[in-house]
Image (spheres, rainbow, N blue to C red):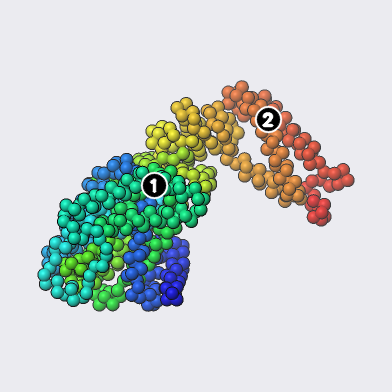
C-alpha cells in the first residue's frame, strides 16, 4: 500500500504544481498535465512501468466525458447533425487513412501494415480536443460542433477498425509476436460465437442500454433520491457508467461509444443535472491523470535514438491532417475562425491510436520496433496539440475579432432553458453567475462577440446573436421559459423586446435592467414585471459608505439608506403617473419637478424624524465623534 500511496502522491503533486502554472501562463490545463507527466516520467524517473496500467484505468475518464457529452444532446439534436456526423466525419476518416496508408507504403511498410498505420493516424484525440474546447468555451461554435461530429464518428469507426485489423495479419510477424508473449486476457461474451450470433449479442447489448435508460433509470434514481444521501446518488451514477462500459467491453464494443449512447438516452431525464454534478469531478480528475500518463509514457530512449524520424513523422501527421481538414472545412462551408479551429483542433493523433497499435502488434500486423516509434509519434503529436490551440488563440482569433460584429451570422442555438439572459455585459454577467451558482439552467444571448467569448471562458453557455430578434428568442425557448432577463445596452431595443415578449408570451416573467428613471418608466409601460436600475443599488451602497466616512455609525447609515429606499418606493407610483401624463417628455416638467421636490422633502423629514441627533449633541452629523461610544 505504501508504494501506491507514494505513486498517487507523485501524480497529484505534479498536477497541482504544473496545471495552475500552465493556466496562469495561458497555456491551458491539458499542456500542464502533459508537461507534468514528462517531468515525473522520462525526466526524473519518479514513475515507471506502472504508467501503462494507470493509463488504461485513466482512459475511463474518456468514457465519463462522452457520457456527459451525450447528456448535452438529445436524439433530435443527434439526428440534426447527421450530415456532418457521417459526411464530414466519414470523409475525414477515409481521406486521412488513405493518406496515411500512402505515406507508410512510400516508407517501405507492407500494404497490410500501411493500412493499419493509416487507420491509427486517422483518429484524433477526443479527450484533449473536447476538454480544450469546453475549457475555452468553444464547444458551441460552428468549428467546435464540427470537430465534435468528426470525433464522434471516429469513436464509432474504431469498432470496424478493430474487426478489420486481424484480417491484415502478416505470417512473417506471427512467430515474433508470439515469442513476445503477447496475449489477450480480457473477458468476452462473443469471442467464440459465429458471426450471426455475435451480431445478435451486440444488438441486444445496445438495446439493453437504450431500454434501461428509457424505462429503468427514472425508477432507479427516484428510489435512490428518496434516501437523501448524496454519496449514494454518486455511487449510483458511477455504477451506471461503469456497468455500461463493462457491458460494451464484454461484446467487444467501444465503452466510450456505449457511454455516449446512454448519455443521449438520459439527455431529457429529470436527474440530468444531478448526474452531471456528481460525475464531473471524477471525469476531470481521470482525464487529468490520463494526460499525465501520456506525457509520462513517452519513451525517451526511442525518442533520442530516432528523434529525426519521430519529429518528421509527427510534423507530417499534423500537416497532412490539417490540409485534409482544411479542404473539408471549405467543402462543408465552415468559415472564418471556425474553419481554423476545426483544422488545428483535429490535426493530431488520438488516444485510441495506442489501442489500435497494441491490437495491431498482438495480431501480427505491425512489427514491435515499428510500433515503438509510432507510439512516440502518437504521443508527441498529442503533446503538440495545446500549442495548436495557443496558435488559434493568439494568431487566428485576433485577426477575425477585428471584423465587425454585424458581419457575422448568428450562432445556431441548440439549447433551451427556463431562463433566457439577453445581454452579458457587466450587469448580465453577475446575474448569470448567480443563477449558475444555484444550478439554474440558462441560455445567454448577446450581439457582442467579445462579451460572448468572455463568458465562454468561465463556462457559461452563450450564443452570438441579436436577442431582440423574435426568431432567435423562439429558438432559445421563449415559449416555455419562465424568466427573461433583459440586460442589453440598447435602450430602444430593450423596450421593444419587452413589448414583443409581453404581447406574444405574456406568461414569461420579465426582469429588465434600466439605465435611469425615465428608461425604467418606459420598461414599466412596455410590461416589464421587475425593473432594476443599473446604478441605483451601487449608489445606495456608496452613499452608505459616504455617511460612515463622515462619522455616522455603520448601522445607523444602513438604517438611513433603508429609509431612503422606503420613501422612494412610497412615491414611485405618483412619480410614474406624472411621467405618463407628460407622455414621457422632459423629465423635470413643472408637475414632475414639483412632485420630485416633495419626495426630497419627505426624505429629509424621514431622516430627521427617525434618526435625529440628540439635543445635547450640538455638532453636525458629519463631525467626527471623540470616541466610539459617542457614535
Q: Name the residue nearer the viewer: 37 or 157.
A: 157
| Crowd band around label 1 with a 10 angstrom C-alpha radius: few (<14), some (14–19), many (20+) | some
Q: How many marks?
A: 2
Judged by depth in the image, the label closer to the viewer, 2 or 1, is 1
User: How far is the residue under mark 2 from the one under mark 1?
Assistant: 55 Å
Quadrant assignment, res 592 = top right
Q: Residue at x 33, y 65 (%)?
A: 56
- Residue 567 percent coordinates (x, y): 70, 34
| Crowd band around label 2 with a 10 angstrom C-alpha radius: few (<14), some (14–19), many (20+) | some
Q: Residue at x 35, y 47 (%)?
A: 213
Q: Name the residue nearer the viewer: 333 or 610.
A: 610
Q: Which residue is mark 2?
A: 571
* Element at label 1: helix
Q: Is there any visible trace of residue 387 in the rendered image? A: no
Relative to 326, say whether 419 is above or below: above
Asked if disc 2 and disc 1 are in contact, CB closer than 8 Å, the reply is: no
- Residue 172 percent coordinates (x, y): 11, 72
Please give left or right for residue 332 compared with residue 174 in the image.
right
Please give left or right for residue 578 compared with residue 70 in the image.
right
* Element at label 2: helix
Q: Name the residue nearer the viewer: 563 or 618.
A: 563
- Residue 417 percent coordinates (x, y): 44, 40
Q: Residue furthest top?
A: 581
Q: Which residue is mark 1?
A: 217
Q: Residue at x 72, y 30 (%)?
A: 598
Q: Name the residue nearer the viewer: 531 or 582.
A: 531
Q: Residue at x 12, y 68 (%)?
A: 170
Relative to 426, say whether 191 is above or below: below
Relative to 519, say whether 273 is above or below: below
Quadrant assignment, res 188 = bottom left
Amino acid at each position: 500500500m505504501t508504494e501506491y500511496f507514494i505513486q498517487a502522491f507523485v501524480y497529484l503533486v505534479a498536477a497541482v504544481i504544473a496545471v495552475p502554472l500552465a493556466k496562469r501562463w495561458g497555456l491551458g490545463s491539458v499542456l500542464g498535465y502533459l508537461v507534468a507527466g514528462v517531468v515525473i516520467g522520462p525526466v526524473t524517473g519518479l514513475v515507471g512501468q506502472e504508467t501503462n496500467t494507470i493509463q488504461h484505468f485513466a482512459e475511463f475518464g474518456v468514457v465519463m466525458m462522452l457520457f456527459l457529452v451525450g447528456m448535452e444532446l438529445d436524439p433530435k439534436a443527434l439526428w440534426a447533425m447527421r450530415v456532418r456526423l457521417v459526411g464530414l466525419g466519414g470523409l475525414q476518416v477515409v481521406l486521412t487513412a488513405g493518406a496515411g496508408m500512402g505515406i507508410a507504403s512510400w516508407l517501405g511498410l507492407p500494404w497490410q501494415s500501411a493500412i493499419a498505420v493509416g487507420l491509427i493516424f486517422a483518429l484524433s484525440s477526443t479527450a484533449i480536443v473536447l476538454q480544450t474546447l469546453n475549457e475555452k468555451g468553444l464547444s458551441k461554435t460552428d468549428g467546435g460542433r464540427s470537430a465534435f461530429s468528426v470525433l464522434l464518428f471516429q469513436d464509432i469507426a474504431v469498432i470496424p477498425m478493430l474487426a478489420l485489423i486481424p484480417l491484415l495479419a502478416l505470417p512473417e510477424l506471427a512467430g515474433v509476436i508470439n515469442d513476445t508473449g503477447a496475449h489477450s486476457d480480457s473477458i468476452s461474451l462473443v469471442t467464440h460465437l459465429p458471426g450471426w450470433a455475435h451480431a445478435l449479442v451486440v444488438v441486444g447489448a445496445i438495446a439493453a442500454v437504450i431500454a434501461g435508460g428509457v424505462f429503468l433509470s427514472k425508477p432507479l434514481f427516484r428510489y435512490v433520491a428518496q434516501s437523501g444521501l448524496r454519496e449514494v446518488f454518486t455511487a449510483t451514477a458511477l455504477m451506471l457508467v461503469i456497468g455500461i462500459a463493462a457491458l460494451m467491453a464484454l461484446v467487444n464494443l467501444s465503452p466510450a461509444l456505449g457511454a455516449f449512447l446512454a448519455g443521449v438516452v438520459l439527455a431529457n431525464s429529470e436527474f440530468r443535472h444531478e448526474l452531471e454534478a456528481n460525475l464531473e469531478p471524477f471525469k476531470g480528475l481521470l482525464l487529468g491523470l490520463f494526460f499525465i500518463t501520456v506525457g509520462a509514457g513517452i519513451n525517451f530512449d526511442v525518442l533520442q535514438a530516432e528523434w529525426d524520424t519521430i519529429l518528421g513523422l509527427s510534423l507530417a501527421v499534423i500537416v497532412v491532417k490539417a490540409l485534409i481538414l482544411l479542404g473539408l472545412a471549405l467543402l462543408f462551408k465552415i468559415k472564418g475562425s471556425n474553419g481554423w479551429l476545426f483544422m488545428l483542433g483535429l490535426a493530431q493523433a488520438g488516444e485510441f491510436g495506442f489501442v489500435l497499435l497494441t491490437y495491431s502488434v498482438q495480431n501480427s500486423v505491425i512489427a514491435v520496433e515499428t510500433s515503438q516509434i509510432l507510439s512516440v509519434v502518437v504521443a508527441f503529436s498529442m503533446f503538440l496539440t495545446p500549442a495548436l490551440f495557443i496558435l488559434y488563440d493568439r494568431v487566428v482569433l485576433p485577426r477575425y475579432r477585428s471584423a465587425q460584429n454585424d458581419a457575422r451570422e448568428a450562432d445556431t442555438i441548440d439549447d433551451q432553458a427556463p431562463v433566457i439572459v439577453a445581454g452579458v455585459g457587466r450587469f448580465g454577467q453577475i446575474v448569470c453567475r448567480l443563477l449558475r451558482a444555484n444550478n439554474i439552467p440558462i441560455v445567454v444571448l448577446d450581439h457582442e462577440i467579445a462579451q460572448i467569448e468572455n463568458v465562454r471562458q468561465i463556462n457559461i453557455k452563450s450564443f452570438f446573436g441579436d436577442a431582440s430578434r423574435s426568431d432567435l428568442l423562439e429558438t432559445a425557448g421563449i415559449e416555455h421559459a419562465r424568466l427573461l432577463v433583459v440586460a442589453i445596452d440598447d435602450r430602444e431595443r430593450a423596450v421593444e423586446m419587452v413589448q414583443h415578449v409581453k404581447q406574444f408570451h405574456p406568461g414569461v416573467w420579465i426582469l429588465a435592467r434600466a439605465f435611469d428613471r425615465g428608461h425604467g418608466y418606459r420598461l414599466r409601460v412596455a410590461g416589464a414585471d421587475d425593473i432594476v436600475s443599473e446604478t441605483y443599488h451601487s449608489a445606495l451602497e456608496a452613499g452608505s459608505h459616504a455617511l460612515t466616512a463622515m462619522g455616522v455609525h455603520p448601522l445607523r447609515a444602513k438604517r438611513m439608506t433603508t429609509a431612503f429606499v422606503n420613501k422612494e418606493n412610497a412615491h414611485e407610483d405618483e412619480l410614474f403617473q406624472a411621467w405618463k401624463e407628460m407622455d414621457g417628455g422632459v423629465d423635470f416638467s413643472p408637475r414632475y419637478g414639483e412632485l420630485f421636490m416633495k419626495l426630497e422633502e419627505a426624505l429629509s423629514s424621514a431622516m430627521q424624524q427617525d434618526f435625529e441627533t440628540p439635543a445635547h449633541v450640538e455638532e453636525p452629523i458629519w463631525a467626527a465623534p471623540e470616541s466610539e461610544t459617542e457614535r
